[in-house]
Image (cartoon, rainbow, N blue to C red):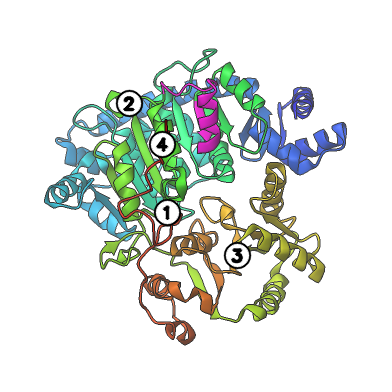
Amino acid sequence: MEATIRAAKKILKKEDSGSLKLKVLSKSVAEKIGDVETSDVKGWILASDKFIANGKDISLAKASKKRKSDDEKSAKKAAKKAKKESKTNNSGSSGTETSVSSSKGDLSVDAVGEWRTEHKIVLMGTTDDEDGNKISAELNKNAAYIPYNNFNSDRVKSSVNEAFLHQCTVVNGFTKPSAIQAQCWPVMLHPGSDGKRRDIVGIAETGSGKTLAFSIPALHALAKEHIAGKKGRTPRMLVLAPTRELAMQSHVVVKEFGALVQLSSVVVYGGVPKYQQINELKKGVDCVIATPGRIKDLINEGNCDLSRVSQLILDEADRMLDMGFEEDVRFIISQCMDKEEGRQTAMFSATWPAAIQKIALEYMIMPIRVYVGFNKIVGSNGEGIMDDALSANKRVKQTVEVIDDYAREARLKSLLEKHSKNNSKKNPYRILIFALYKKEAARLESTLARSGYSGLVTSIHGDKAQDARTKALHEFKSGICPLMVATDVAARGLDIPNVELVINYTFPLTIEDYVHRIGRTGRAGKTGLSYTFFQSGDKSHAGELQQVMKQAGQPIPDALMKFGSTIKKKEHKLYGNFGPRGGPMKKAVKIVFD
């Protein structure tokens, strides 16, 4: 890997422009070194802090910093000029309400309610009792929390770093913030009455832009402290993610935007040697993106100090806590700056079950809840309560087929034959097939390879080494292999663009995983298609599956209705029906006999 980085640096230094397309650079490095895949080179270049990625262009970090400093100077001059103009234009206005409505491109106070209704945004206080309802009403009236509905408004320009706005609009081509970004940015950037930045719980459908929703406010806060670049500095921002792939994905975004304000980052996960990660931490970094297991190991070994972490983000928080990471998460948070000392904590997910909320709120101070695009439905816990845990993407057409086990393979091949006709090199038709177990995923991959899809199918599951998983993801994203078989490791959080079809070969263990699986398609405002094979052994999920389909406006097949619509009381994921009622099992106590 080090030889690859050195070779890439030499090639870039010879370029007059100082940059190359990622594809061209990776190919050149692979040819120069030999015995290395181009896809592996791409991953190493993107993961290294020696380079800066501007869209598809790669340049050396030092050279980019010089150019960016010039850009920032000119951006500051433009911002000062805009401020003077806005003061002149608004000199006759009086009161918060008038100034907000007259600012260029901003929503007026009167229009906020209509905009939030249109985008299905709800601001709520911490609790649902009478006091909580009063707080919720005040939050919705607060002019400071008016959404940033476009990048050109004066409120956005005065609150968000100019370099970030330039990266969003000019480099990445974003026309406006997504709904969750528009509402979360003012909440996270604007301090409360006590002068401290507010904690937040953000819940939105998959593919809604949650990563930028938490990255930009957190990086903006760190940039204002002006201590980036000092050697031996300890992390001030921590992003915890449940899987390696999600951690790597978040790192790409944090690295891209952090580099604009000279903030370095490192991604820390298991399955790879520790020494490289330890070396990066010793050099001094500002942001750490990590999985719970590996970061806990590094803390215990004395290689990672989180005492100065003032920006804490739990991505896919419900999964981390619900899948047995609670003890690790509690330990990691205890190593960060205390919440009473000014730590800002953000939790983001596509679902937020009631049982997890109770545990999560221990880490936060009176958080504001932001719901985007969700309709409440009855009963994921089977207790007759209104619950926001299950809300499927309405742009995904759901087709459920009740089928016998022996018929699934033939039906899968039939669907692939039908939809693979749309595949081409220029426009790959990506199909994601979900299996329940690692062995099943490996078997399906080999079966499809023997059935005429050799070289077109890949897989990702827990039995694969990290390098192989990274390569498989790259091949699927790039369209080299338009078919991918996966376990639920790929169901949550991963941003795989342009997945046209999701096939649930085996129904998942929980309805939340079903919602996340089909959420891999229909992302970023596009439509998608899903097929689900439902067997008689899955009948305990029939009621809640019908609820999800009904809430999303999907037709429910008669064969599924025959299983009944009763919603089974939710079991604990780890302990089944024998699990604790009030939350995860307490830690075992060792008894020593004399």
Residue 300 included in the magenta stretch of the image? yes
Is residue 149 in view?
Answer: no
Tell me if label 3 and label 4 are in contact, CB under 8 Å.
Answer: no
Q: Earlier in the sequence, mark 3 or mark 1?
A: 1
* SS at circle 4: loop
The quadrant where residue 199 appears: top left
Look at discs 3 and 1 and give the one toward the viewer.
1
Q: CA distance from mark 3 to mark 2?
A: 44 Å
Q: CA distance from mark 3 to mark 4?
A: 55 Å
Q: Earlier in the sequence, mark 1 or mark 2?
A: 2
Q: Residue at 76%, 28% (x, y): give it.
A: 8
**Residue 385 placement, left or right of 37:** left
* SS at circle 3: strand
Q: CA distance from mark 1 to mark 2?
A: 27 Å
Look at discs 1 and 2 and give the one toward the viewer.
2
Residue 371 included in the magenta stretch of the image? no
The residue at which mark 3 appears reads as 500
The residue at which mark 2 appears reads as 338
Quadrant, the N terminus: top right
With respect to residue 99, does 528 lie above or below? below
The residue at which mark 4 appears reads as 591
* SS at circle 2: loop
Q: Residue at 52%, 34% (x, y): give it.
A: 289
Q: Nearer the viewer, residue 490 or 223?
A: 490
